[in-house]
Image (spheres, grey):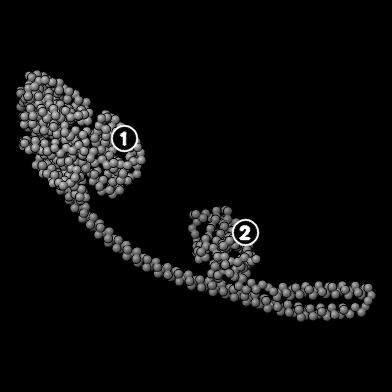
Amino acid sequence: MKNKYYIFLLLFLIFVYFGCTKKKAEDIPVTSSEDSLSTYFSLANDFTLAREKRQEYSNKAFVIVVNQENDSLNRVSLFKVANRYYNINNWRDFNKTVHLVLEKSESAKDTINITKAYTYLGDYYESQSVSDSAFMFYYKAEKMYAKLGDNINLGKTLFSKANLLYKAGDFLGSEKSVFNVLRIVKGEKKINSILYDAYNLLGLIYNELGDYESAIVYNNKALTVIDDEIIPLEFQSRATSYNNIGFLYLNSQKYLLAKEYFQKGLEQKNLIIQKPYVYTMLLDNLAYAKFKLNETEGLPEMFYQSLKLRDSLKLTSGIFINKIHLSEYFASKKDTVKALQYSKEALLLARNTNISRDVLVALKELAVIEPEKASDYTKEYIRINENLQKAERKMGEKFSRIEYETDQIKGENTNLETKNRNLLFGFSAFTMLGLFLYIIKAQKTKNRELLFKQEQQKVNEEIYNLMISQQSTIETNRIVEKKRVAQELHDGVLGRMFGVRMNLDGLNKFNDEIAVNQRNSYLSELKNIEQDIREISHDLNREKSELINNFVAIVNNLFEEQKKTFEPKLVTIIDPAIKWESLSNAVKINLYRIIQESLQNINKYADANTIKVKIKKKGDDLFLSINDDGVGFNVNKAKRGIGIQNIQSRTNECDGTVEIKSNKGEGTTITITVPIEQKQILTEK
């Protein structure tokens, strides 16, 4: 049972090594504009620094990275931060960082980094001895890497599963999984780190199965594939392999060979600085080999030195085995008190950490030291061993169930995706059909509106033409009447006045001063009358022909009707520079209707005292302003009635804009701006 404990201890060491190697190998250079980030990453991975310092630099790097934009470089940087936490065994921050990068990867639909995050979560749960959760995440990552065709990462994930199977006591299942890893990565480049981990695990498996020769063969294979360019020297992979091989010889009771390999491991440069827990393991194992060889030199000081260093590093599993070794050592020296002290301390530690295998080792040692209580220790040993075997069997079954249930859920999700896709296609087709029908209906409605507008435009023009015709008839009658009056003035009054002048000419026969003065006075007066009558006749006869088709006259009629019918004072200003006959009838009728509609609205709702209507030309624009001093309204809240809508619609038909300004108690101003070409409105010069 002690051998099994050693195996699990070695497994822990190898997996820690594997984790560090994986994290280092997966580091991807990140180009950062901040030199401090690159510096923090470098210092956080400096194995010569104290753990506290590396933690500090990792935290500083995290603060910088977490505030960056969620892009591919940011997610790679978060993985680098997680790696630094992993290498200092800071599982809490490691877990937080991995969940953050998983969330960002899912948000960006980044499949590669989602898969990578699954492997990291598997590492986390394995470190916390939550094997089922670890297995589930490894299995998810395995399926995704297989789908992506990434054989290197698929091999690493399968190795993690194999390691879990080994810990669960499924040695044959673990062996099968490791060989599956070797088959998958065969032919790939730069796989030395994967081969190293696989060979080491096979060595542990065969050691557990009692096949020590095969175990030594695979540990030697692991030693030969070490490539310092792929597996950095600071990981101390050679020292780890020497320890593994020495441990196998220790189990085979070949203590001299075991001692030789432990010494080789301790000779590795910077070992105590870069991998202190490997150093403590080698030192403890070397002391135990010397103890088995009955070499007393340096004992028990080597055990104490290893224990002290392990205690400072809080290496619980290493402290346990150190105390078991010390118990065996003092038992051999017949120092029962110290032997019992260390074995009981080891048992208490095993129970506090809830590691069943360690409890079994401690109980076995106590049964040897205290034979009078051996029966009690043995009963407890048997009970715990049976429970352990059941737990290992259940764990193996749980792994199989996880694979089955995950595949089942995946199948159900696939079916659900198919159903959802079919529903989506059906809904899309239905939506497109509905949209198509809507477009057809809308187009028909639009065509009807267009026809209606065209008819309305024709009607408006006809109405305007009728108004013009009516106005023309009125003006024609006025002109005829004026000509008649002019003719009567010319033929009647002027004729009679001409006779008076002729009679007065008779006064010329009298040459006295009175007659001359009277005659001249009459003649002068008659000339003035004649000139006045001629001017009246000419004015009546030359009424401007612009009255025909004159838009201003029509509008003025509207204004006159407004003044006669309603109380508000009406002030109108029409720019005389506008030549209205150049405008199309459509524009003029819309302007007329806008003025008419506005006056109606003011009469109904405004309660105004004064109304001002201005029509001016500014550049290429015609401005119509209608202002009242009535009650006003809130433009933003008021519901726009049909009158306002008609004004807006008619302005749009003129390609113009309308602006309405109003506040409660401050009256209302409507400004219509109609863009026109220079040739449409001409200024009289």
Q: Quadrant of residue 448?
A: bottom left
Q: Nearer the viewer, residue 640 or 39?
A: 39
Q: Quadrant of residue 25?
A: top left
Give residue 580's position: percent from left, percent from top: 60, 68
- What is the number of the mark on residue 610? 2
Q: Nearer the viewer, residue 423 or 16?
A: 16
Q: Is residue 348 above or below residue 183?
A: above
Q: Is residue 658 above or below residue 104?
A: below
Give residue 678's position: percent from left, percent from top: 57, 65
Total marks in image: 2
Under mark 2, the amino acid is: Thr
Residue at image position (24%, 33%) is 88
Q: Quadrant of residue 73?
A: top left
- What is the number of the mark on residue 468? none
Q: Is residue 652 visible?
A: yes
Residue at image position (49%, 54%) is 637
- What is the number of the mark on residue 40? 1
